[in-house]
Image (spheres, rainbow, N blue to C red):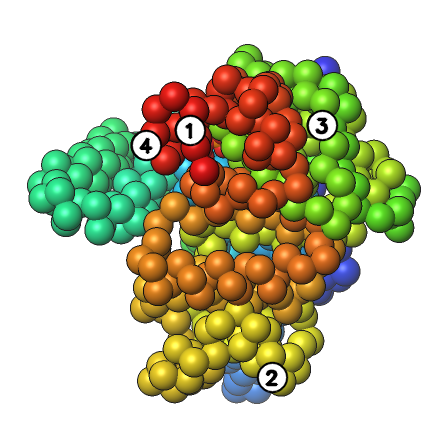
Amino acid sequence: MEKKNSPFSMIMQYAGSYKRKYVCSVVLAVISVACGMVPYFAVAKMVTAMIGHEEKDMSFFVMWCAAAAVGYISKGIFNGISTSISHTATYLTMKEIRQRLISKLTKMPMGTILGSHSGHYKEVIVDRVESIEVPLAHLLPEMTANVLAPLLMLLYLFTLDWRLALISLITIPVGMAVMSTTMKSYGENYGRSVEIGGRMTNAIVEYMGGIEVIKAFSRSESSYEKYETAVNENAAFFYGWMKSAQWAMSAYNAITPSVLLTVLPFGFIFYASGSLTAGAFVTMIILSLGLLEPLIAAMNYTDNIARVSTVMGQINEVLESREINRTGKVTKMNGNTIEFRNVTFSYDNENDALKNIDLTIPEGKVTSLVGHSGSGKSTVAKLIAGFWDVTDGELIIGGQNVSDIPLEVQAEQIAYVEQNNFLFDETVMENIRKGKAGATDEEVVAAAKAAGCDEFIRGLDKGYQTVVGSAGGHLSGGERQRIAIARAMLKNAPIVILDEATAYIDPENEAVIQSAIAKLVQGKTVIVIAHRLSTITDADNIIVMENGTVSAHGRHDELLRHSQLYRSMWQAHTGTKGGAAE
Ligand SMILES: Nc1ncnc2c1ncn2[C@@H]1O[C@H](COP(=O)(O)OP(=O)(O)OP(=O)(O)O)[C@@H](O)[C@H]1O
């Protein structure tokens, strides 16, 4: 059976070099709690001296008063330093976890990421990691200290009177027995709260993401309803959970600290029977009062352990998920010819999106992929771009099997211009620079000029320094497309994949975009996913896809003669009948 790691051993894997900080913080926290007990000892000493009518001069009392004061002050100072160190270690550990999660996302197949709800990874990386801040920063030092220090005090109590020391602890098991009734289901309830909270996040992410559609189709009410339902579900769950746990928590909080309920009567019996001195009795009363407070504080952290455990489970699920499978043996490719050898690919392990495909995309030529919607064109392009591993068969780029090419080497070879290219909420300059890290401003402007967007960029409020808004929302579709082409131009990768835009086809934009694309693809190995056949009649090679297979390939005029499917698509496109196309 697989060994299940404790939440803390999981965290320590990420804490790495910050472990020493945690150790240091725990040690200081123990000292802090120990200092906090000094005032109790001081009071016990002084009261015992007074009751016992011991001959003590003023200096005795001054000394114990001073010790109590030093105890209080030191407690504060050590606690402050301990908390500060544990917070530093925690933030560094959280940074480490987040960095690993982000870097993991780049190694996972796109299918895994796209197949999840858009809020899922944001939730794990931002919210879940955030939620371990408090447990992590406080739990380790404070829980250890709050358990260790009272144990030491307990030892001392046992040396005074073992019977009363034992009795002083009775309320703990009673309180815990009451509490355990709700703690049993804590892990499960917390897991459910995470699940319901996740649904609420997804509902709001979807609501905000689809706000345009919602408004355009006057669906505000029904969409809001979905969000409202998720919020209500969340509120109802927490209300129910807290309500069911409330009585046990209140009883626990009332019973556990009531140490005098047992110490006073039993202590008196022992005192009356002569087996306990008045001094020891008073000392026991005072010290037992200081004994339970830290223990109760420690127990209050137990719910945090379940929380950390759930969160670490989610984090590990992402970190241990399947990566794109690369041996990374190859560092250099021989040219850019792309070959699919008997490739089969399935998104869901049930239906094959590509079935036993054999095709060659020659270097330095323009190859177009055509076919009806769902025939597999984008899947071919995305396999070339390394978004997924092939399920079966071999994909060869530059004479090398992609499974041997490191993902970043493959990514360097390819510029992918999609229909909806994502623009970051940064300046136009930075958005284009994403094509080539470290490119100078001059290089960026040159790429923009070549892509035909220099003029409109200079016409923007702040020219190249204009921030384009989240996902490029402040720009028109055609403008976003041209910026994406400029980005690809700057990258200057030898393989260019173009998912031809179906939108933005107003003649003016179309002409600019076509001339920008012509410059982008010069001398490159080009794969065009063509939606309008008129744009690809000059292509060197056209591949006709049908239901995940290659139905035919050749030049435009050859296909018109030999491929029934291509001919009918061409007729549909030009609106002609009887094959008299062109
Ligand atoms: N992320 C995905 N998860 C599951 N199935 C998918 C996914 N993407 C595509 N498919 C399925 O794979 C098949 C091929 O899709 P693909 O997107 O490659 O077709 P296409 O020819 O590019 O279509 P279109 O012209 O409409 O973009 C389709 O049946 C589609 O439903």
3D distance between C-alphas at marks 2 and 3? 40 Å
Looking at the image, residue 156 sits to the left or right of residue 499; the answer is right
3D distance between C-alphas at marks 4 and 1? 10 Å
Q: Which residue is mark 2?
A: 441
At 43% from the left and 24% from the top, the residue drawn is 579
Mark 3 vs mark 4, foreground winner is 4
Is tag 2's residue or tag 4's residue first in the polypeptide sequence? 2
3D distance between C-alphas at marks 2 and 4? 47 Å
**Residue sitting farthest toward the front:** 580
**Residue sitting farthest toward the top:** 350
Q: Which residue is mark 1?
A: 580
Label 4 CB sits under 8 Å from any ligand 1 atom: no
Q: Which residue is mark 4?
A: 575
Q: Are marks 2 and 3 in contact (CB under 8 Å)?
A: no
10 Å crowding of disc 3: few (<14), some (14-19), many (20+):
some
Q: Which residue is mark 3?
A: 359
10 Å crowding of disc 1: few (<14), some (14-19), many (20+):
few
Residue type (three-letter) at the residue carrying disc 3? Leu
3D distance between C-alphas at marks 3 and 4? 30 Å
Mark 2 vs mark 4, foreground winner is 4
Would residue 579 be visible to someone looking at this image? Answer: yes
* Picture layout, residue 165 above or below residue 32: above
At 46% from the left and 73% from the top, the residue drawn is 453
Is tag 2's residue or tag 3's residue first in the polypeptide sequence? 3
State the image quarter where residue 403 is shown. Answer: top right
10 Å crowding of disc 2: few (<14), some (14-19), many (20+):
some
At 59% from the left and 51% from the top, the residue drawn is 416
Residue type (three-letter) at the residue carrying disc 1? Ala
Looking at the image, residue 345 sits to the left or right of residue 252; the answer is right
**Quadrant location of the C terminus?**
top left
Q: Position of residue 304 (x, y in %)?
A: 47, 44
- As helix, strand or loop, the secondary structure at mark 1 comes to loop
